[in-house]
Amino acid sequence: MKKPANLRMLETFEIITKGHFQLSSGRHSDTYLQCAKLDSMPAIMRTVAEKIYDENLMWKHDVTHVVAPAMGAVVFGYTLASVLGKSFIYLERENGELTLRRGFKIPEKAKVLCVEDVVTTAKTLNEVVKIVESQNAIVHDKVCIVNRSPDSSIKSYIKLEVDSWEPDDCPLCKAGEIPPSYPGSRKK
């Protein structure tokens, strides 16, 4: 069976990596999605953003702002906002919590597209949603490049089923494999 074009593209640019990894969520996996590699390829990132937009054309009229967490989703969020012609705001971690900084404000009643690069547990994306709602803005939709979570309501460039385990249940750890590497951006 032929692989979907979206999956072939991620494999071509080595976005999908195999090994033993500890994810930002704390879970372990034999697959890591390094979407940050797309950040160095603006034309490819724009292609990803345009593909997602083409499948969700109503965003052009319904969304007023795009909000993403730093660090991983900044380039994707900015690119998607550029494709939509909308304002872009990014959130940063301060004392371990996502927060609005640098004078950014999410206007009350703004219709916001909440963006992430890779979603596994949706923890960070849910933090973005919480901040948007705390500003009395409206979460219009949630989107990511790769959705590896069971939440099918999150729009994505590609939905992948990738195994992940709690550290105590990790078969790679139990088999005595090499310890997991931690390629994520969130400080442990």
Image (cartoon, rainbow, N blue to C red):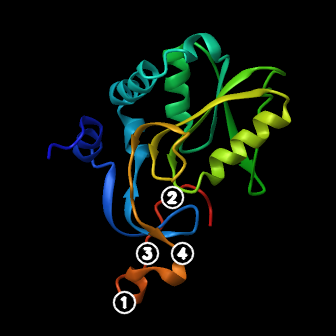
Looking at the image, which is closer to me, 151 or 7? 151
| Label 1 SS | loop
Residue 107 percent location from the top left of the image: 81, 21
The answer to whether residue 28 of the structure is visible from this angle is yes
How far separated are the C-alphas under marks 3 and 2? Answer: 12 Å
Tell me where residue 110 sits by quadrant: top right
The answer to whether residue 92 of the structure is visible from this angle is no
Residue at left offset 28%, top offset 49%: 14
Residue 175 percent location from the top left of the image: 35, 88
Looking at the image, which is closer to me, 106 or 57? 57
Q: In terms of sequence position, does the residue under pointer 1 or pointer 2 come before the other?
A: 1
How far separated are the C-alphas under marks 1 and 3? Answer: 11 Å
Give the labeled residue for mark 3.
180
Q: Circle 3: is it few (<14), some (14-19), or many (20+) Cα within 10 Å?
A: some
| Label 4 SS | loop
Kind of residue sitting beneath label 1: Gly
Q: Which mark is residue 166?
A: 4
Residue 3 percent location from the top left of the image: 20, 44
Q: Which mark is residue 184?
A: 2
| Label 3 SS | loop
Q: In terms of sequence position, does the residue under pointer 4 or pointer 3 come before the other?
A: 4
Q: Are marks 1 and 2 in contact (CB under 8 Å)?
A: no
Give the labeled residue for mark 1.
176
Q: Are marks 4 and 2 in contact (CB under 8 Å)?
A: no
- With respect to residue 76, does 163 lie above or below? below
Q: Nearer the viewer, mark 4 or mark 3?
A: 4
Q: In terms of sequence position, does the residue under pointer 4 or pointer 2 come before the other?
A: 4
